[in-house]
């Protein structure tokens, strides 16, 4: 169940609701009788599920919202939010920067939950254990197909480091797990390892198929079937369009939609803008058509025209011998320089992050304006202040540039893309996500307060380490991580977001 609360009119305008959140039914007709921990007053409260867009007071106790009303209950602390929007904390489904430094930039961008769902992590239990009690933001991850594939092929377990992208590059000597097709025995092992990862708390299966070109169409289809059996969503970076003869940008989407239709798997396609390019209108039409036919499929995009990846990965295997103009589209993250054929080969041997420029802003703006395309950063880890600006500015850029300055998206639609839609994507496997992405009684006090007239991104490709502006306060579970536009030191309120499923999967390969 999701909240069945609604805002009723009248002189008091109090939210009279019955909220069904994580199984707890809470009435909210009267203000709390005992003092609350924090009362946020006079803010413009936006709740994307009920449609509430009114000045209200928000009362918080023990990390949860206990009242949203015009009343002012007694409180240990009061925060004046006049002139600010009080929104659910932003939920980023696609954040490769899982280290503390990257989380600081995301917190200043309004993010309260940042998850690694595209590539995933491996082993899952160890990754979660490393972060318990030490996280600024809520965190979670899928089971990495690449990590499970590496172990199934007999390689050493490469434990996910802070950036959670350990398998984007080559394997350090034996790259069979990236480039070779799996035998039946290997495929059975991959399936079993990935299913075990769900039991350890994984939030679904994470596939980076462009980075594992050896994974066959059959392998992908079979693993979608395993995910469907476990009611686990699939998060996928599509296969390169070069793998489909004359298929164009639309063919990789068709493969995934066909897999979802025939297995019943729920699917989330990451960075639709990167994968579709200028074919985005056709691709989004294809996705919407699948949804209309009852297929559970969602997608996301970040608001920038340049992508980023590891230069040593299989993604760049076909770049040898390209034109000078093609290499000039590549920007080396560590120095900001544009590459040449010579520097491309040198850095490819060295390994590291590279930005690829070249998409059209007209198409980028159109994608951002679509209310059913989830906002997600695809942010890469910060290293000595160097990264892609999307890791620091995605959400403020949408609110400031595209909502306020360009007016291509309403404020409520933008908030919905950043909060409610990503929460709903995970609710089937994590029922606790029903308490996120909302400003309602019973919801977690993950909140972002921003000035709609001042919010804007400041990170650029030349200077990616600039904090967003106008995000005044950010709370995670009722604890300030940003206050008065400054990071709060020494707090680690982030909680693990783990799968709620512990069922045993049927081994369909036996």
Image (spheres, grey):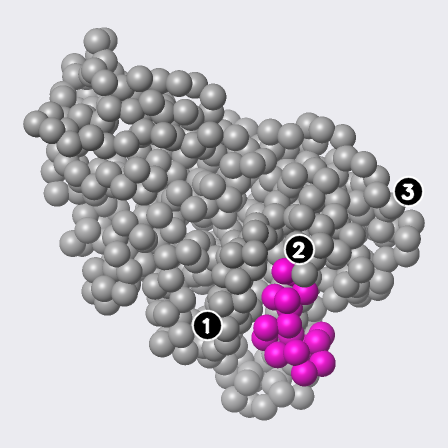
- Is residue 178 toward the left or the right of residue 62 in the image? right
Q: Residue 184 carries which label?
A: none
Residue 475: in sight, yes or no? Answer: no
The residues bearing labels 1 and 3 have C-alpha atoms spaced at a distance of: 42 Å
**Residue 35, percent from left and from top:** 21, 12
**Residue sitting at 88 percent across and 51 percent down?**
186
Magenta stretch encompasses residue 226: no
Q: Is the magenta stretch mostly helix, strand or loop?
A: helix
Q: Which of 186 and 485 is in front in this view?
A: 186
Q: Which range of residues does the magenta coloring cover?
A: 241-257
The residues bearing labels 3 and 2 have C-alpha atoms spaced at a distance of: 23 Å
**Residue 478, percent from left and from top:** 33, 27
Q: Residues within 10 Å of mark 1 (few under 14, many from 20)?
A: few
Instruction: Classify mark 2: helix, strand or loop.
Output: helix
Q: Nearer the viewer, residue 329 or 496?
A: 496
Residue 252: in sight, yes or no? Answer: yes
* Quarter occupied by the C terminus: top right
Report the residue marked by disc 3: 510
Q: Residues within 10 Å of mark 2 (few under 14, many from 20)?
A: some
- Is residue 376 toward the left or the right of residue 119 in the image? left
Q: Is residue 393 above or below residue 447?
A: below
**Residue 496, percent from left and from top:** 53, 31
């Amino acid at each position: 169940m999701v909240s069945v609360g609604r805002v009723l009119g009248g002189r008091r305008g109090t939210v009279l609701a019955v909220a069904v959140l994580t199984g707890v039914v809470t009435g909210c007709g009267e203000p709390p009788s005992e003092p609350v921990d924090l009362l946020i007053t006079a803010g413009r409260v936006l709740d994307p599920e009920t449609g509430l867009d009114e000045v209200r007071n928000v009362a918080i106790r023990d990390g949860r919202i206990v009242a949203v009303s015009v009343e002012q209950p007694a409180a240990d602390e009061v925060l004046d939010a006049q002139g600010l929007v009080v929104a659910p904390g932003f939920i980023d489904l696609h954040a490769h920067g899982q280290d503390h430094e990257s989380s600081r930039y995301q917190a200043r961008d309004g993010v309260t939950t940042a998850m690694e769902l595209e590539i995933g992590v491996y082993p899952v239990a160890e990754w979660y254990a490393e972060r318990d009690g030490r996280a600024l933001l809520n965190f979670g991850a899928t089971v990495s197909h690449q990590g499970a594939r590496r172990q199934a092929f007999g390689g050493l377990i490469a434990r996910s480091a802070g950036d959670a992208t350990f398998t984007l590059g080559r394997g350090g000597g034996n790259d069979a797990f990236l480039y070779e097709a799996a035998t039946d025995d290997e495929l059975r092992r991959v399936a079993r390892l990935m299913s075990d990862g769900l039991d350890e708390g994984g939030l679904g299966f994470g596939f980076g198929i462009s980075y594992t070109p050896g994974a066959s169409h059959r392998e992908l289809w079979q693993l979608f079937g395993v995910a469907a059996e476990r009611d686990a969503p699939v998060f996928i970076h599509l296969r390169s369009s070069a793998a489909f003869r004359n298929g164009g940008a639309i063919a990789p989407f068709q493969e995934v939609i066909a897999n979802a239709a025939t297995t019943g798997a729920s699917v989330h396609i990451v960075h639709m803008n990167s994968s579709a390019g200028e074919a985005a209108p056709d691709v989004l039409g294809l996705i919407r058509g699948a949804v209309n036919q009852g297929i559970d499929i969602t997608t996301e995009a970040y608001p920038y025209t340049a992508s980023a990846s590891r230069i040593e990965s299989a993604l760049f295997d076909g770049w040898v011998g390209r034109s000078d103009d093609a290499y000039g589209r590549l920007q080396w993250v560590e120095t900001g320089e544009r590459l040449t054929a010579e520097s491309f080969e040198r850095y490819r041997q060295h390994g590291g992050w590279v930005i690829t420029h070249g998409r059209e802003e007209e198409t980028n703006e159109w994608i951002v304006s679509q209310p059913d395309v989830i906002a997600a950063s695809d942010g890469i880890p910060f290293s000595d202040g160097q990264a892609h600006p999307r890791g620091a500015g995605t959400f403020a850029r949408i609110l400031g540039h595209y909502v306020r300055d360009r007016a291509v998206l309403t404020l409520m639609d933008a908030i919905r893309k950043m909060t409610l839609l990503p929460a709903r994507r995970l609710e089937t496997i994590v029922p606790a996500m029903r308490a996120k992405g909302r400003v309602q009684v019973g919801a977690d006090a993950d909140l972002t307060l921003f000035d709609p007239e001042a919010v804007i991104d400041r990170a650029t490709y030349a200077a990616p380490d600039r904090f967003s502006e106008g995000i005044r306060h950010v709370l995670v579970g009722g604890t300030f991580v940003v206050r008065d536009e400054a990071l709060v030191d020494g707090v680690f309120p982030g909680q693990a977001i783990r799968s709620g499923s512990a069922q045993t999967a049927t081994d369909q390969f036996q």
